[in-house]
Amino acid sequence: MQLTGIGVSPGIAVGPALIVEREDVPVVRLRLGPDAVPAEVDRFLRAVAASREQLEGIKERLARDAGSPHGYIFDAHLLMLEDPLFKDRALAVLREEHVNAEWAVRKVAEELHDRFARLADDYFRERSSDLDDVLGRVLLNLRGAGDAPSLRRLPGSFVLVAAGLAPSDAAELDWERVLAVATDEGSATYHTSILARSFGVPAVVGLREATRRIAPGSLVVVDGTRGQVVTEPSAPMLASFRAAQERDRVEEERLQSIQALASVTRDDARVVLLANVEFPDDAETARLHGAEGIGLFRSEYLLGRTREWPTEERQLEVYLQLLRDVTPHPVTVRTWDVGLEDLAPGGPTCANPALGERALRLLPRAPDAFRRQLRALLRAAAQGPLRILFPFLTGPSDLRAALDLLAEARESLEAQGLDHAARVEVGVNVEVPSAALTADLLAGEVDFFSIGTNDLVQYVLAADRGDPRVSAHYQPLHPAVLRLLRSVVAAGQRAGVTVSVCGEMAADVLPALVLVGLGVRELSMNPAAIPRVKAAVRAARASELQELAEACLDLPTAQEIESMLRRALADVLAPLAAF
């Protein structure tokens, strides 16, 4: 069986499928060998026993502390635990289907919910909430076991197949054991896609039916370059994929050989290549790929899975470590770019979170959190070249509020006599059309622009970058996007402000060359993309790229622009395996 989606992280990987079901806490579905089933049965029985002990303790404490007559509620829960419809059926699923205990509980829960829904009596239908409580407790006890499989602790190396992964789940994933990623949802700028590229893991998204059609444990081939996923390939097909894997390996070695070479065009235009990083440990990966610093550190990592604001000292520790890891190069830290939905799951939501209460719009709700971050950044900047990047600003008024907060943070540090940078470079993440259209007004107040093309493209084209149904409308080479980028670059050049691009356009060779032609001289991308972009830069002439960029602005469609670029840059693109 072959599925076609969007290839978002190049390369080929082959391995057994691990299915991740969508839940508040993802449920991992594993296919077990017959010899592993007895241990899994024992793990399930231990979770049931622990749940029974907890429920009995709750019942006793309720009676002791409140004299409550409602102990019968927990009697019912205890009976559910031992009911053959649950316990015996779950054991049968474990033994017959050779799956992990979490999946067996999940499957039996669905069966029981169907039974409850068919009951005529309202009282019994409403008992489904009791069922959720009991089975949820069993799942929690399974997950709390030291040998429980989870996204953070995979029991082997797998091809991860999921409907989609929340950013917090993707961040906690055991990436060293992920051979490849295949998801029903997503786009090239999907958070999981960005992380897959960062770790050099092949990925295909937008498959729609992967979780339904791929069986757990089946052999899967993921071709992230061509956007293909094949299950149970024939021997000749598998041999073909293995040969392509070897070609990719040789090409990767060739690209890595240019790591120490300068990123300079054939006519001596210097293009600085930086890295976007998600985690502090990525700094070492960035250095190994030839990055000349960190162009974007997404500080949301520090919120952790609990989404709690970190202390100032914790932040200072991380920022200083980043500076040490990339010295003498700069580190650019983006201030908090989260929404209310991220911080309070289950609370009030916006119809479109991308347009809602996020980033500095949360300042009235959490002023201390932003103030602590700026204090930590100013303290770290005293030890090295750290730059502060404010995201999601819509114009000069937002920038003034951010700069006022920065001044407050500096004054508080001075009052306490704490060492901090008297001067720090400040930039604006140009990712909202209103910020791009007022770039000339912003330029006089900042040291640099960092254009976030991921959001800017979706806002300009009204195409949700995370929705596969409109992915064809998300076109970074659309003439409207290129014209807007040209105006931002021109505004920066007139004011003597550095203009960088930190969106995924910088990591894709063809758009990256157009950006250089538009006058951008600083590109920040996932570390794995740096060697390929550097090879393209070194093979091109800036003067020719400028002429091509100007020609792009006169063409009416993204398709015509891409076709023209591929023809004109055939000699530059030919040595690169992805083209």
Image (cartoon, rainbow, N blue to C red):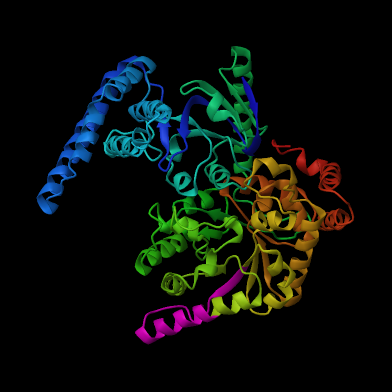
- State left or right for residue 153 relative to residue 390: left
Residue name at image x 53 percent, y 24 percent: 214
Quarter location, residue 372: bottom left
Asked if residue 422 lies in the magenta stretch, the reply is yes
**Vertical placement of residue 222 versus 57, above or below:** above
Which residue is at the front of the view, 574 or 121? 121
Q: Report x, y in % for residue 19.
A: 47, 30
Residue at point 52%, 54% (across, down): 277
Q: Quadrant of the C terminus?
A: top right
Highlighted range, magenta: 404-428
> Against 448, is 431 above or below?
above
Q: Is there any visible trace of residue 36 in the rendered image?
A: no
In this view, which residue lies farthest toward the left? 64
Rendering quarter of residue 549: bottom right
Is residue 238 left or right of 579 when viewed as pictured?
Answer: left
Relative to 201, does residue 327 appear above or below in the rendering?
Answer: below
Q: In this picture, is 201 found above or below 438?
A: above
